[in-house]
Image (cartoon, rainbow, N blue to C red):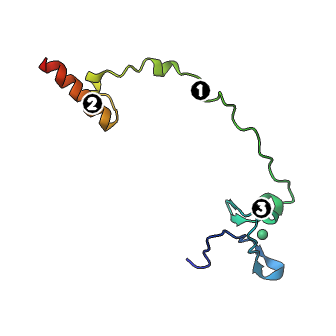
Amino acid sequence: MTGETDRPECTHWIGAEQRHCKEATGVRPYLTGPRCPAHTPRALQGLKENEPGPGMPASAWTTPSPLSDSRVHDARAIASGKRRSHPNAYRAAQAAVQEGTQL
Ligand SMILES: [Zn+2]
């Protein structure tokens, strides 16, 4: 690629000056490309930047699902391959079932 630098610089085309902005301070990535604070999509529309909000409440994703309670991982089910699991869990379950049958 051409014009690629370590520091992102504003790629906004200043039509009146027939050049790219090239401002490197405070540049952040936007859908339209890297932009300095003066040329963000909202700034170009004459709008105020969105204020950073509190985001999702911390408890939003911590509610335990009743579904997960019923997911009892049975070693036999995992070893048989009927229950999807990680390869490590699969091998451990197969070993556990093997030991059980050998005893
Ligand atoms: Zn700019």
Secondary structure, mark 2, is: helix
Q: Is 21 situated left or right of 100 in this image? A: right
Distance, label 1 to label 3, CA atoms, is 35 Å
Where residue 93 sits in the image (x, y, percent)? 26, 27
Mark seen at residue 51: none
Distance, label 1 to label 2, CA atoms, is 29 Å
Where residue 91 sits in the image (x, y, percent)? 25, 33
Residue 63 placement: quadrant: top right
Say whether disc 3 or disc 2 marks the residue closer to the N-terminus: 3
Residue 46 placement: quadrant: bottom right
Q: Is 86 situated left or right of 53 in this image? A: left
- Residue toward you, 81 or 101: 101
Mark seen at residue 92: 2
The amino acid type, in three-letter code, at marker 3 is Thr
The amino acid type, in three-letter code, at marker 2 is Ala
Check if mark 1's residue and mark 3's residue have beta carbons within 8 Å.
Answer: no
Distance, label 3 to label 2, CA atoms, is 53 Å
Residue at 69 percent of width and 65 percent of height:
34
Neighbourhood count class around disc 2 (C-alpha, 10 Å): few under 14, some 14–19, many 20 upward = some
Say whether disc 1 or disc 2 marks the residue closer to the N-terminus: 1
Query: Which residue carries the number 3 mark?
Result: 40
Query: Which residue carries the number 1 mark?
Result: 62
Where residue 26 sits in the image (x, y, percent)? 76, 63
The amino acid type, in three-letter code, at marker 1 is Thr
